[in-house]
Image (spheres, helix red, strand yellow):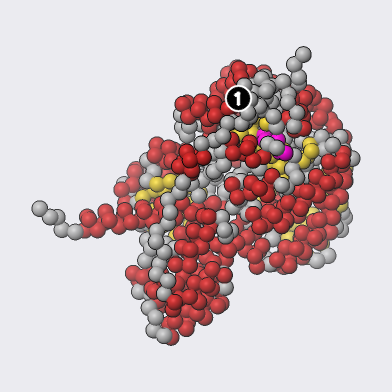
Amino acid sequence: MSQTHKQRMLMAVEGDLPDELPYAPRIDLWYNANVAAGTLPERHRGRTADEIALAEGWALHKEVADHLRQPRADAMLHRALGVHFLKEYVAHFIFTERVKIDVLREGDRTRIRYTTAKGSINTSTVYSQEMRRSGTSVPWIEEHAVKTPEDINVLASVFEDMDVVPNYETFKTHEVQVGENGLPVTAFTVAAGPVHHIQKYFLDATEFFHYYRDHQPEIRYLADALAPLYKKALHIVAESPAEVIQWGSNFDDMLTFPPMFAKHFVPWIRKAKEVLSPKNIRVLCHTDGENNGLMDLLHDSGMDVAEAVCPAPMTKVTIQEYYRRWSDRITIFGGVPSNLLLPQLTPDAQFNSFMDGLFSGIGDGRRFILGIADTTPPDADFERLVRIGEMVREKGRLPLKAGAFNPVDTAAVAGVLAEKESAASALQDTRFAQIRQAVLDGREQDLIEAVRELLLKKTAPKDIIDQGMVAAMESLNESFKNGTVFIPEVLAAARAMNAAVLFLEPHLTEKEKHRGGKILIGTVKGDLHDIGKNMVATMLRGVGFNVTDLGINISADLFAKKVAEERPQVLGLSALLTTTMPEMGKVIEALKKAGLRNSVKVMVGGAPVNARFARDIGADGYGRDAAAAVEVAKALVAESAFIEAKAASPARG
């Protein structure tokens, strides 16, 4: 008798060998978007997402809460605080009467004021029709709770006046509904502890890193207010009927960078393991980002399951490398990058080659649950999901015929992942040693004072910038690319440099003010993500470019209008969602229509974007990350300058 989906998944979690490789693709966002658009496959019209999965013979993916289908109308009302009343969660925050809550709904926007004895804080979230059409199931935090350091005391008092209570009954109902068709996973929040909670909810993505560096005592104070609630939640989970809990999500070696991860994430993952393991409750982490710099920390963190594991070609670590380094103690759940489901990004031959490599590279199949990382995109080729299911039936009997791990060709992988080294660094003139060190340390006032001293010595302002500040930022960018410095240091250095350049501006000629070339950058229409774009803009400014950041959710027509007004050498387009990637092509078409395409170079980037897509839409360059984007921008500006110079020079003949 064959095993059930739940039995297979639990055996994989425990390190045992089920009869067949479990396959549980996440299809909720795909389903939401295609229901809204009326584009479900004909054979599945009228079915729920769960009915579709079961009809295809797949396990239900129940590792992430279904945010849209909840018994409580206020399930996501307090998202900006990371407070969710979801049926899948066995522990819920509750507000006490000491916190006054005022809610104002304005169409798609929800504004909330929280008032305590220490004052008030305000938040707002947005859940628009555009977001619904894209399949997004959670509101976007438009206004974060912390906007000044003073807000931290008020926010801490909100959580000091809160409690945590069990929510076993609705979870039991959910568990019965899932039955043997999947593995229902609970949660409390999707943060891996108090500091992660602060990062995910309370601050703008970029501002968090400034606060983490500049306001450590305040961050610790707020984390201390959250800690008792997290501890109580763990003990509530320990007495619950749940078998697996999600403890932390969206790990990424840039955003949840290694020193912070080691200091604030690992201890809480271990604490969860310590409390829950005696109760046979397993700890699952949603590790959907770039984990190259976190591999050892994650391996030793104590988690039992790494879910939404997203390997190369979408990130830097191959699935074979994940399995080699983690499968002795961690069950890997995922393994298929979402862009493999998009024919416009991954041709059939590449898709088939990847899947063949996956089946031959995961040993006997122990500690592996096949799934999509992070989720099936709304515009995915559904038949590729079906094909993966067929592959499981054809060659997924365990133990796999491969029998043992096949070592990956590390030389080939290195060739694929190799990145172009940056241009030679500026001359290390000792006059600028103080300038460079002040930039590297992010010491704004010391940097301005060092600039003032050099000006008094009649040092050329351009040299102060190029041989002092830009040289330091070039060095810092290399260290960032190599994983030896992290976002807070880069942002602090850029902030100090921007202040010093502003101080120097009256001493610069007009030509010197625009020394590095002009770049416009923005996130395309329908996409509200900005941390990647912000990092690219920061690093471009740091090496001397004049950057105008247009922000998020920018339409093709507005991009074209701004190019006409600003006349940049380069336009940078960012997208984090597969559903918004086509907007990049629309921007290029808008530039053509406006007669501007030949006057500006276009570079693109973002997690789902690759070089093939960039080439297909007619972009001039592609940067896989912020450091690579800087090198691409330099090359494009140089090419643009060469073309301009050639056009301006008299013809020879």
User: In the shown orientation, is residue 590 left or right of residue 134?
Assistant: left
* Local SS, label 1: loop
Part of the protein shown in magenta: 329-333
Picture coordinates of residue 410, whole percent (x, y): 51, 40
- Residue at the far left: name it: 653
- For the N terminus, the image quarter is top right
Is residue 330 located in the magenta-colored stretch of the structure?
yes
Q: In this view, does 15 lie above or below 435?
A: above
At label 1, counting other C-alpha atoms closer than 10 Å, the crowd grade (few under 14, some 14-19, many 20 or more) is some
At a point 46% along the width and 51% down the height, the residue shown is 628
At a point 54% along the width and 43% down the height, the residue shown is 316
Residue 238 visible in image:
yes
Name the one closer to the observer, 263 or 496: 263
Which residue position holds label 1?
402
Is residue 525 located in the magenta-colored stretch of the structure?
no
Q: Is residue 579 above or below residue 469?
A: above
Picture coordinates of residue 632, whole percent (x, y): 41, 52
- Residue at the far right: name it: 239
Picture coordinates of residue 246, whole percent (x, y): 75, 41
What's under tag 1, amino acid-wise?
Ala
- Residue at the far bottom: name it: 456
- Magenta stretch: dominant secondary structure: strand
Picture coordinates of residue 561, whole percent (x, y): 40, 52
